Amino acid sequence: MHEPSFTLLRPLQGISPDARYDETLLKQVIDQGPLACIWQTRRSLVVPRSYRRFDAFEAGCEQFALQGWPVVVRQTGGGIVPQGPGIVNLSLAYPVEGPPMRHSEAGYELICGILADALHSLGLHAFPAAVEGSFCDGRYNLAVQLQGAAVKIAGTAQAWRRVAGSQHTHIGLVHALVLLDADTAQLTAVANDFETAIGSEHRYQADKVISAVELLGISEGLQAHFEQAVAQALRSLKCHSH
């Protein structure tokens, strides 16, 4: 894949009230070209559309909204993911020619490479790996090695949309969620509670996910450093692609 040159956007103060914020990038790309965005959102549980198949889904949503965990249905695939303070998102949106399946793997490799570079600048060696037992598991998680096992620090997902009026042009939205300074035990417990409430059999293990703060032991200045490192990785990409 020819790596796009991304324009980096940020919501006001980096915070969006909507966990589907990055879906707005799909339209903006047509006028503005490839876009990247670093952002956060309020506390919520984000699920793919497939979760609507559970009979107790609507009741579960009402229950968790009352508990301060509103549920948001997203376009990208995968499984349940918590959002909120201490979780940083990176979204890439860009056009491609041809069927999405031809570009899917390259999209995951692109975003994993950017985030691995950024995490490396914090002193963390992260690599793509499936981590069985983590929420929203997939081949293109980013994981770190801990006591001989891979533990998830970031997750990824994608959505693709054909450009209206075109036959072969698609816009890809490639998203990653990074556990920077979050209580991973609490996040795992909430994800499990929601799965139980809707009658799903999925269950997750708290020791399969970890935050950067848990690994580094420091939080002061961490988010600013990480976001600067992501921006630098995007700039390096731009240099390499010409």
Image (cartoon, rainbow, N blue to C red):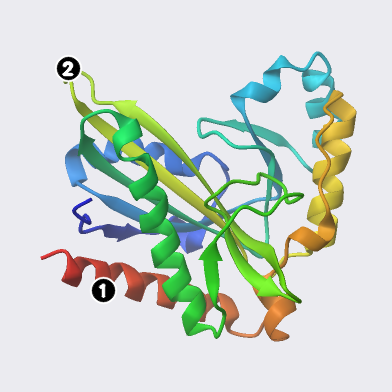
Image-quadrant location for residue 45: top right
Front label number (2 vs 1): 1
- Residue at numbered disc 1: 236
* Crowd tier of the residue under label 2, counting other residues whose Cα lies within 10 Å: few below 14, some 14–19, many 20 or above: few
Position above or below: 112 against 25: below
Q: Which amino acid, mark 1? A: Ser
Which residue is drawn at the image coordinates 31% and 60% (left, top)?
A: 8
Label count reads 2
What is the x, y in percent for residue 126? 54, 71
List the single residue furthest toward the front. Answer: 148
- Residue at numbered disc 2: 165
What is the x, y in percent for residue 16? 53, 50
Position above or below: 160 against 190: above
Image-quadrant location for residue 131: bottom right
Q: Is residue 227 left or right of residue 142?
A: left
Q: Which amino acid, mark 2? A: Gly
- Give the camera-side residue of 24 and 170: 170
Which residue is drawn at the image coordinates 78% and 21% (left, top)?
A: 57
In terms of secondary structure, where does tag 1 sit?
A: helix
User: If you read the primary sequence from the N terminus, does the residue marked by circle 2 or circle 1 appear first?
Assistant: 2
Which circle marks residue 107 in the picture?
none
Q: Is residue 187 left or right of residue 171?
A: right
In terms of secondary structure, where does tag 2 sit?
A: loop
What is the x, y in percent for residue 195? 83, 33
What is the x, y in percent for residue 155? 58, 53
- Give the camera-side residue of 53 and 99: 99
- Spatial CA span between label 2 and label 1: 34 Å
* Crowd tier of the residue under label 1, counting other residues whose Cα lies within 10 Å: few below 14, some 14–19, many 20 or above: few
Which residue is drawn at the image coordinates 70% and 79% (left, top)?
A: 215
- Give the camera-side residue of 51 and 181: 51
